[in-house]
């Protein structure tokens, strides 16, 4: 493994080669480490403002997952899995001397965080799972109905404007009020759209629907794990959050806004997340 770092006014930026991939990461603040894992179609920039708020109490580690934005696709790499992504995160924590950490994931990032808890318990102090995408643990007729309602919107956008148009439509839906353009600044949106083809080819829905964690293994988890859901939640995400919370014998914490509230309402989101992290880190 090799690492290279530079310092900016707000964060230390680094690139590190682990598990056959080169990962771009940033570190802010000091205190107990929290690793923030982004979802499909985004990069670590979706957490920039939240990370700034949390850095007053925590050492916040963010990274672009392999294939996204500043973390290039490895040569000859043709597909991915939640397990591969979790292995990347585990290696990142070890190689940067940040293990064990509290791990936060949102959307598909929750699957990666959950897999870290299940298969790499040595690097995990606890976890907070926001809007968990554990769709394969739900009744499959319900999941098929939910995707059947979503797919025409994506297919129509794909037909009219290609992967970037489909990407905008999908994340516009997850934004709640507003649109894709309302989420963050133009520079970050351009980075995200540069991964549109990758998003649909590698991750959505293939990676998400390819992961089915063992309910018995979840129920046996010893580390503290909390589930969060959005106040303005889609039916499939509500069902997934309630299912996972029931397995963990915990009550979901309700975060403000919609699925991507950490982009649109970062200060409120951070202030909801902060006490949850502190409870998990105790």
Image (cartoon, grey):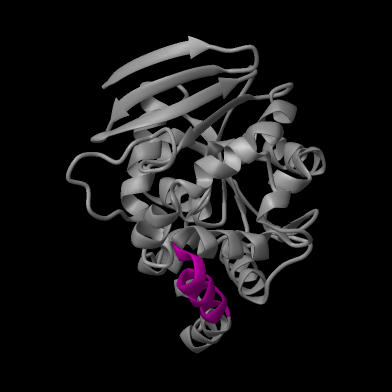
Vertical side of 71 occupied by 148: above or below: below
Question: Number of callouts in the render?
Answer: 0
Which corner quadrant of the image does residue 27 belong to?
top right
Query: Is 125 contained in the magenta span?
Result: no
Q: What secondary structure predominates along the stretch shown in magenta?
A: helix
Residue at 73 percent of width and 50 percent of height: 182
Residue at 25 percent of width and 39 percent of height: 74
Q: Quadrant of the N terminus?
A: top left
Please state the horizontal and vertical placement of residue 243, each as a whole percent of the image. Answer: 59, 71
Q: Please state the extent of the stretch shown in magenta in the rendering.
A: 150-162
Along the line of sight, the residue nearer the viewer: 61 or 191 = 191
Please state the horizontal and vertical placement of residue 102, each as a whole percent of the image. Answer: 56, 36
Along the line of sight, the residue nearer the viewer: 104 or 16 = 16
Vertical side of 84 occupied by 203: above or below: below
Residue furthest left in the image: 76
Q: Viewed as shown, does residue 102 lie left or right of 90?
A: right
Q: Viewed as shown, does residue 141 lie left or right of 57?
A: left
Q: Quadrant of the C terminus?
A: top right
Q: Is residue 133 visible?
A: no
Please state the horizontal and vertical placement of residue 84, each as a whole percent of the image. Answer: 31, 48
Q: Is residue 150 visible?
A: yes
Along the line of sight, the residue nearer the viewer: 9 or 222 = 9
Please state the horizontal and vertical placement of residue 189, each as a whole percent of the image. Answer: 59, 44
Residue at 67 percent of width and 70 percent of height: 238
Which corner quadrant of the image does residue 268 belong to?
top right
Query: Is 158 contained in the magenta span?
Result: yes
């Amino acid at each position: 493994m090799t690492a290279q770092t530079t310092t900016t006014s707000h964060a230390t930026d680094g690139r590190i080669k682990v598990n056959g991939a080169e990962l771009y990461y940033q570190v802010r603040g000091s205190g107990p480490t929290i690793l923030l894992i982004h979802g499909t179609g985004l990069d670590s920039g979706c957490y920039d403002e939240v990370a700034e708020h949390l850095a007053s109490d925590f050492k916040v580690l963010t990274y672009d997952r392999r294939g996204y934005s500043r973390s290039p696709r490895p040569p000859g790499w043709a597909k991915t899995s939640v397990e591969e992504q979790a292995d990347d995160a585990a290696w990142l924590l070890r190689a940067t001397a940040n293990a064990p950490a509290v791990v936060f994931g949102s959307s598909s990032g929750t699957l990666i965080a959950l897999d870290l808890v299940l298969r790499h318990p040595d690097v995990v102090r606890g976890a907070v799972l926001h809007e968990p995408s554990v769709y394969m643990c739900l009744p499959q007729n319900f999941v098929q109905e939910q995707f059947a309602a979503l797919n025409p919107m994506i297919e129509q956008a794909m037909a009219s404007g290609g992967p970037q148009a489909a990407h905008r439509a999908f994340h516009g839906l997850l934004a709640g009020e507003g649109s894709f353009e309302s989420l963050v600044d133009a520079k970050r949106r351009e980075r995200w759209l540069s991964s549109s083809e990758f998003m649909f080819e590698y991750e959505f829905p293939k990676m998400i629907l390819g992961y089915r964690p063992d309910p018995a293994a979840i129920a046996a988890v010893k580390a503290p794990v909390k589930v969060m859901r959005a106040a303005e939640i889609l039916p499939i995400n509500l069902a997934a959050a309630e299912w996972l919370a029931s397995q963990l014998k915990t009550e979901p914490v309700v975060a403000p806004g919609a699925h991507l509230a950490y982009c649109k309402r970062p200060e409120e989101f951070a202030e909801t997340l902060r006490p949850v992290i502190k409870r998990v880190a105790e």
